[in-house]
Every structure is written in C-alpha cells, then in structure tokens.
Image (cartoon, rainbow, N blue to C red):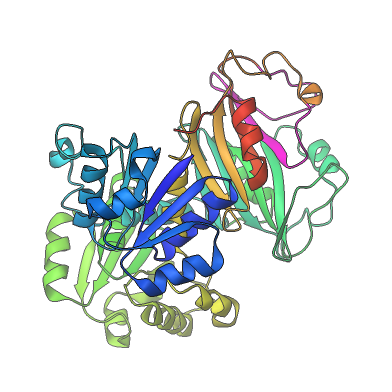
Amino acid sequence: MNIIICGAGRVGSTIAKLLTEQNHSITVIDQSGDDIQKINDSLDVKAIVGKATSPSVLERANTSDADMIIAVTRNDEINMLICQIAYSIFKVPKKIARIRSQEYLDPKFSSLFNRENLPIDYVISPELEIAKSIQRKLEAPGALDNVPFVENKIRLLEILIDDNCPINGIKLNDLTKKFPKLNAYILGVIRKDEFKILKKNDSLEHNDKAYVMVSSNQMEETLKVFGHNEKKSNKILIIGGGNIGFNLAKNIEETFESARVKIIEKSKERAELIANDLNDTIVINGNGLDEDVLNEANIDEVETVLALTNDDEDNLMVSVLVEKFSKDKRTMALINKPNYSLLQTSLKIDDMIDPRMDTVSSILKHVHKGTIENAYTILNGDYEVIEAEILESSDLINKELKDSDLPDDIRIGSILRGDEFIKPSSNYKFQKNDIIVLLSKRDQLPTVENLFRISSI
C-alpha cells in the first residue's frame, strides 16, 4: 500500500517506521531538512524536503498513486489543508489528520469534516486519546494499562508481576485449573525488554509485564488474582489544566460520580476558562510545584496525582514533591521525552504516560478496513493486538482452533459470540460473525489480513 506521511516529528517518524516494517511503501514529507535526514539515515523510505501543502511537492511524492495520506505536522490548519489538496487534486481515497485544537472538535462543528467541506476521513486528537487512556488506567487500579475491545465488552490489561503476585511461578495450565470460572487469558509477557508468547507449561516470572484478555465484568476479580487489591481513587488531583487535564476531568465528571477532582492550573485566564466549563471539579489557580498551593488542594487527602502540564521536567518534579507528602499516593506523569522513562523507578513514579504511542495506535487502526475495528501496539509496534470479525469468506469458518494452522506468532486471545465471552481452547470452532481479539507479531500481519479477510484501505 502506498502511504504518504506529512510531518517527520516523533509521531510521523514512528508511524513511518512501523508501516515500513509492515512492508508498506512510505513517503515522508517535511520542511525540516534535519528531520528528513534522520528519516533517510534510519528508514528505507522516500523522504522529501518541502511544504506538504504545495501541489508540486505532493506531485513529486506521487500522491495521485497514494492509497492514504496521514497529516501529522505541528499545525492543525496545515494538516487540514493537506487533506483538502490531497482529495481535490489527487483524489487520495483515505485521509487522516491530527488536530489538537478543541474548537475544531466541538460537536456543534461536526459537519466541518465531510466531503462537501473538509474531506478528512479520520480526525485524530492526541489530547482526547490521552485523556481516555488515563481514564482507563484510573478505572483499573493495579493495571499498567487497560484497553477496551468489542465496544468495551472485552479488556486487555497490562499487569506487572510484582512481589505481591500470588500466581508468580505457577504454570499457565495449573492457573486454568485453579481458576476455572475466570474469563481471562494470558496472551504473553514482556520479559527483559522482549515479548514472549507463553505456552501451557510456561509460568509467570517476577517483573514480567503480563498482557491479559479479560471479560470487562471480571476486571476487578482478575486483578485480585494477580495480587492487586487497589481500590479506585475517589480523590484525584490534576496538575495542569491544558487540553489533556481538562478533558480528563470532564470525562471523570460524566462517568465517575463519586470522584472528587481538583485541578491546579498556573495560568489565571486558563483556570477561569476551564472552571466555567466544568461542573463539579474545583479549579485552583497556582503553581503545582508550590507546596502552599498543594496544601490548599488538600494534598494529604488526595489518592492519585496526575502531572499533565506541557513541561516534562515540571511533571517529574511534581511527582517527586508529592512523594514527600505521602508514599502511598499513586503518581502519573506525562512525559514526551523518551529518555526520561529511565528515571521512573529511581523517582518512584507509578506510571509515565507516553503521548506518542497513544496517537500512533489511534492512527494505525485506520490503516486497515473491513472487519478490523481496533488496534493496540506493544513494544513500539513489534506486536499488535487487533479486533476482527469472522466473515463468511474466511478460511477459518467452521475450523477448530487446533486445526487452523495459525503461525506461532499469532495468538487468539478472546472471542465474543453475541454477548458471550469465550476463552480460546483447542476445540473452539470459528463461526461467522464471531469477533476475535488476537495478538500478532508485526511480520505476521499480512497473514492475519488474509485469514480474516481484512483488506488494506
């Protein structure tokens, strides 16, 4: 598939890397000669220095032959214009734009994005995606991540195997016998920075990060099996009232009635603006690094602190300062610079949030169409967890799992048949309209597409 990526920043370069490794033909356009040089030095792509809004530059990129254009420059308006030109002049079938401004995303302006106005097929808002991701983590305390599939009926939990995990060292086969009614299935683990698909006689080890498919109504029960008995936080403090902090507070107000949320925002103008748009959240104008301001927010009573400012260093320092008040508080920090993740353990921060991968996952799920509805990347895209529907044309129809000849690097994680959650077993038989959530190594994605009749574009 021919894909043009406009913008060679962290998101653009990451998407280019992942899609190149999936054997797509990639062209990257950016005005920065330095960013394009980095792309040229590290990836086998066509890289062009120039304005992606220029028809002549797009012509050099053979845009008329493109199946998709992804606009992820730093400017919303440029991203929108790129999609308009790609459609009007070059008739590109699928157009994706990253848009940060909340004004463009206001529901009352929803008619803006259509063929008659701005022909953008998919709008990606990083701030909204990150806010949703953080909210999911708050819904599953004890999990490192919590990803919904099949309209929230199935969840993928990432769980750390720590000193308190009672099933550490137990073979997977024995786990099934010990918890026969638990609708959970372990896809695999990250162990020593590598992903490992576990077999029946394998066991979990200390410091593994396990990826577990679970029925949504058994999240809490599953976490308890892994030794996590943490309760949902009712008292939440957000440092930074930007788009992420504001949208998170708004989401919590709408879905978590018992939660009490406070926001500390440095800008007086911004604090007043978000205070008017929030109903139950208390907004405090001040610096989150000021101990007096933290005391005003009753930091002693807070259970979870989220540092979500636009400054990585401030987010790290807030998390360290909170540790001074109490060692029992859960801390989460938004970090854009990947090297800072190395400081997580030494600074005792419970979770570092990388906004890049949330955006990348949101874009990647639109690279396919047909029966694929969702996608989640693991280890920077080495593996993907995807959701797909069994079509009548699939070679898997009426085959039992043991006879399906799936490659070792593809693992069925769960099945939804109607409203019934099915844990995969060797005698499970694929049926039309079954919705499958599966794990696939990156180089096996073409096999997945063929088996499930998922077509690119």
Residue 57: image location, x then y, percent: 29, 55
- Split into 4 quadrants, where in the image is the C terminus? top left
Instruction: Say which residue appears at 38% left-offset and 61% top-offset.
Output: 48
Measuring from the top left, give residue 215's x and y in whole percent. 58, 35
How many numbered discs?
0
Q: Locate residue 260: give its quadrant.
A: bottom left
Position of 412 with respect to 111 (left or right) is right
- In terms of image quadrants, where is residue 319? bottom left
Let me know if residue 352 appears in the view. Answer: no
> Is residue 297 magenta-colored?
no
| Up-down relation of residue 450 to residue 61 (above or below) | above
Residue 266 falls in which quadrant of the image?
A: bottom left
In the rendered image, the vertical position of residue 333 relative to residue 105, given as above or below: below
| Vertical position of residue 272 compared to residue 380: above or below | below
Residue 81 located left or right of residue 230? left
Query: Is residue 407 located in the magenta-colored stretch of the structure?
Result: yes
Residue occupying the point 19% across, 55% down: 77
Q: Position of residue 251 (x, y in %)?
A: 31, 50
Look at the picture and state if 113 lies above or below 8.
above
Camera-side residue: 103 or 115? 115
Rendered location of residue 296, percent (x, y): 26, 79
Image point (59%, 82%), residue name = 346
Q: Which residues are magenta?
A: 405-430
In terms of depth relative to the viewer, which is nearer, 194 or 264? 194
The residue depicted at 41 percent of the width and 53 percent of the height is: 135
Q: Is residue 279 left or right of residue 60?
A: left
Please give left or right for residue 313 compared with residue 453 in the image.
left
